[in-house]
Image (spheres, rainbow, N blue to C red):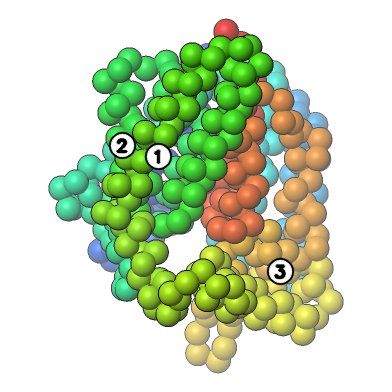
Amino acid sequence: MKNTSWISKVIWFLLFLNPILDIITSFSLHIYGQSMPIILGIKFGFLILLGYLNFKLGNKSASLYVLLLSIYFCSFFGVMYYEKGLDVFLFEAQNLFRTFYFPLFFLFLSFLVQKKLFLIEEKYLFYFLIFSLFFLVVPEIFQLGFDSYAHSKIGGVGWFYSTNEISGILAILGPIFLAYLKNLKGWQKILSFFFYSMGILVLGTKVPVLTFFITLSIYFFFFLYHLWKEKKWKKLGAMISFCIVGLYSLFLFMPFTSFYQNIKIHLNFLEIHQFQDLLTYEHIDHFIFSERLSFLENTHEIYQNSSLPMKLFGLGVAKKDAFSIESYKMVEMDYFDLFYHYGVFGFFFFFLPFWKHFSWRGKIEKKISIFLVFLLAFFSGHILLSPSVSMVSGFLFCLEGEKKK
């Protein structure tokens, strides 16, 4: 290929287009009660474009992986046809391609980064986060957004639809956000930090708040260690003082947030009045895992009672009876959903590209972000198996290609 300068522009444009597509989907679901298939088609058009570039540039690993994955897909559909019939095909196909978006996207993108046809700069990931926060925070300020929860708890999700997806994006990009703040001027830092803080608090979910504290703690001890090692006592004292004042201010403000109110609502619902009351399996499942452990037990039982082909190729996601087709209740813990619904072979092929092409090399913010991706995929799904979030994860996984300054 002679002229490749357009590749970077197209990839960054399509990343920033992603929140717009999610907002269109959100309004379609809230107004018409159904998503727009063309939105998913655009996202997969992006994936096909990356695949075309890989094949055109002779990426043999990608060609082999697509061949193996195609064999698995055909086998999966064969099992679904034998077990459930032909009428589940579209339902299963849509979810299958959504699930395997991440490994394909990562494999294609990492090759372009390796060939220096695409450079991932942290500033664009920072701008992308601010861009997404705009559609979350501004509607909430003017009370024009959608609610995070249908009942019981409180919180707002702006113009987005999935609380889990937008909270996942805020969580895994948090380390990049905090690392890039040092490049901004005073008022830019304050405004950006206000947007991010309000975004993670207004959602009312635990994930972005807890990951924010995890990220801050890692940064805090990392810089403390280096300042102590370099014997910069004044800066060390200033950082400790700043953190103490910041945490104290945050705790004063916390009772007025949706996050804090939802914690109280949940604890009152479970009739937990002291810490010891929480230490039961039922309460941990309900409060920490949002009943995911119960869903896991049910899914495991269904898997154990399934046929050998379904154990190998997966249960699929379609649950069929005499009158309708609906989705299984997902565990929303990515590793388990992947294993049970796409089988031993599906689990293997999903992670196959990462064994050769994944690397921890890079700055500390990349390492923390990837750690959060793997962690949240276990506790809170929609990190690896949703195209909106997994696309962002793919950029984070390829950050080692960033230009050194």
Q: Along the line of sight, which residue is nearer the eye, 104 or 134?
A: 134
Tell me which corner region of the image, top left, top right, bottom left or bottom right, holds residue 145.
bottom left
The correct choice, above or below, for 192 with respect to 88 in the image is above
* N-term mark: 3 or 2: 2
Kindly indicate whether the residue at mark 1 contacts the one at mark 3 (C-beta within 8 angstroms): no
Badge count = 3
401 with respect to 190 (left or right): right
* x then y, percent, for residue 358: 74, 34
The correct choice, above or below, for 25 with respect to 6 in the image is below
- Separation of residues labelled 3 and 1 (CA atoms): 42 Å
Q: Residue at x 50, y 90 (%)?
A: 323
Closer to viewer: mark 1 or mark 2? 1
Tell me which corner region of the image, top left, top right, bottom left or bottom right, holds residue 148.
bottom left
288 with respect to 39 (left or right): right
29 with respect to 229 (left or right): left
Which residue, as the protein is rendered here, is positioned at the far left? 142
Numbered tag placed on residue 195 in the rendering: 2
Which secondary structure lies at badge 1? helix
Mark 1 highlights which residue? 247
- Separation of residues labelled 1 and 2 (CA atoms): 18 Å
Mark 3 highlights which residue? 340
